[in-house]
Image: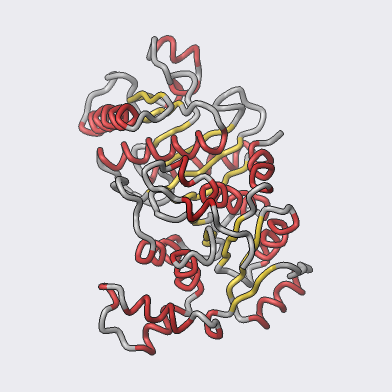
């Protein structure tokens, strides 16, 4: 069974509500219909109803059991305008300007998420990252105790002995351009939590570098060493399940024979399934290379550190990958208490599957 199918099986017992702001995009329409067809939950599409219906007809997609909401005509528009005007960032804004912002589907979807009307948000199939992330970062608060918001991609790589039967988490590949020590440690611990939740396997986190265990010593490698030490401390203090080690070159992280030479005795080297990259350049390049060259499946960017689950899709995501991302976001909503035990997120576990 593929990794994502196991996620689907778990989700069918606890279906969730996911909003897709890009309601006229053919891939999103197909993914929303598949999400509903598979019994994973309720799909909400945003957009002008006539335009969504026309796009669905052209894409030959049934809107049966899919809720379509036009932000400009929504009953909650006045409420959402008041919520926006209450934010310090927008205090004193004119009603017409506030309404213009709120009726942007990305903002409207983020407000639905913030207001508990949906359990997760999946966007970005046609938008750049800033268009999706800006509303989320402005409207959804960070998790208590999490110092920075980041992201990860869950990869299913075919025909490989590496990772957890070919399943990896790559982080951060979408949010923080040049993470500092604290941010790298947070990326490591939060991506490990998600990997554990989704797969049930022990996360083995490799803090990647161009150096293995001091083979090169520069400010860049010293940052990885410091981040590794801090992440280990967080693992210990929070009694988090998993192993972490660094700094490790990627061949040392993945290949046992090389690990025995470069990092003997490491609990991670040669067994890594969570790869933490030193910066956004290397992470984003790596995930797209592996995804395209192996013919694998990439589910992301899954946002980490937000109080409510959301994802920023790659604009190259397939229909199947969009469904998978929606399922992963829904799994975060279901098991929020276990994933972030300090948050007491019973509101997610009790959320109904209907609107």
Left or right, 37 with respect to 215, comes to right
Left or right, 160 with respect to 203, comes to right
Depth check: give the residue in front, 175 or 78: 78
* Quadrant where the C terminus is found in the figure: bottom right
Q: Is residue 296 above or below residue 303?
A: above
**Number of on-image labels:** 0
Q: Tell me how the rendering is colored.
A: secondary structure
- Residue 90 place in picture, x, y as percent: 29, 77
- Residue 162 place in picture, x, y as percent: 56, 24
Please tell me in which quadrant of the rendered image residue 35 appears.
bottom right
- Residue 123 place in picture, x, y as percent: 53, 62
Left or right, 95 with respect to 26, comes to left
Q: Is residue 168 above or below residue 322?
A: above
Which residue occupies 58% across, 51% down? 325
Which residue occupies 44% across, 10% down? 260
Please tell me in which quadrant of the rendered image residue 43 appears.
bottom right
Which residue occupies 65% across, 62% down? 42
Depth check: give the residue in front, 248 or 244: 244
- Residue 331 place in picture, x, y as percent: 56, 47
Which residue occupies 64% across, 64% down? 354
* Quadrant where the N terminus is found in the figure: top right
Left or right, 331 with respect to 307, comes to right
Q: Is residue 186 above or below residue 94?
A: above
């Amino acid at each position: 069974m593929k990794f994502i199918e196991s996620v689907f099986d778990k989700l069918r017992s606890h279906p969730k509500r996911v909003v897709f702001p890009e309601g006229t995009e053919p891939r999103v329409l197909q993914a929303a219909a598949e999400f509903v067809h598979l019994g994973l939950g309720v799909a909400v599409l945003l957009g002008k109803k006539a335009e969504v219906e026309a796009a669905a007809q052209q894409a030959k997609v049934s809107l049966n059991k899919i809720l379509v909401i036009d932000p400009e005509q929504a009953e909650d528009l006045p409420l959402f305008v008041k919520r926006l005007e209450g934010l310090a960032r927008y205090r004193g804004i004119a009603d017409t300007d506030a309404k213009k912002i709120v009726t942007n589907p990305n903002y409207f979807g983020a407000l639905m998420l913030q207001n508990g009307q949906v359990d997760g948000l999946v966007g970005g199939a046609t938008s750049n990252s800033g268009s999706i992330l800006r509303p989320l970062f402005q409207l959804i608060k960070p998790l208590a105790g999490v110092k920075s918001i980041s992201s990860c991609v869950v990869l299913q790589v075919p025909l490989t002995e590496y990772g957890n039967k070919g399943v990896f988490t790559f982080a951060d590949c979408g949010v923080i351009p040049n993470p500092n020590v604290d941010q790298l440690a947070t990326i490591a611990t939060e991506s490990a939590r998600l990997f554990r939740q989704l797969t049930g396997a022990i996360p083995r986190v490799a803090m990647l570098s161009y150096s293995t265990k001091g083979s090169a010593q520069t400010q860049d490698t010293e940052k990885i060493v410091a981040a590794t030490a801090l992440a280990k401390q967080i693992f210990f203090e929070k009694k988090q399940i998993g192993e972490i080690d660094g700094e490790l070159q990627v061949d040392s992280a993945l290949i046992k024979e090389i690990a025995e030479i470069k990092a003997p005795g490491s609990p991670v080297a040669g067994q890594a399934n969570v790869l933490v990259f030193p910066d956004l350049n290397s992470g984003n390049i790596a995930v797209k290379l592996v995804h395209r060259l192996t013919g694998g499946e990439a589910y992301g960017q899954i946002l980490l550190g937000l109080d409510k689950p959301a994802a920023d899709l790659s604009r190259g995501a397939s229909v199947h990958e969009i469904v998978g991302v929606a399922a992963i976001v829904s799994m975060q909503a279901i098991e929020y208490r276990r994933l972030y035990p300090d948050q007491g997120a019973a509101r997610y576990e009790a959320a109904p599957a209907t609107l």
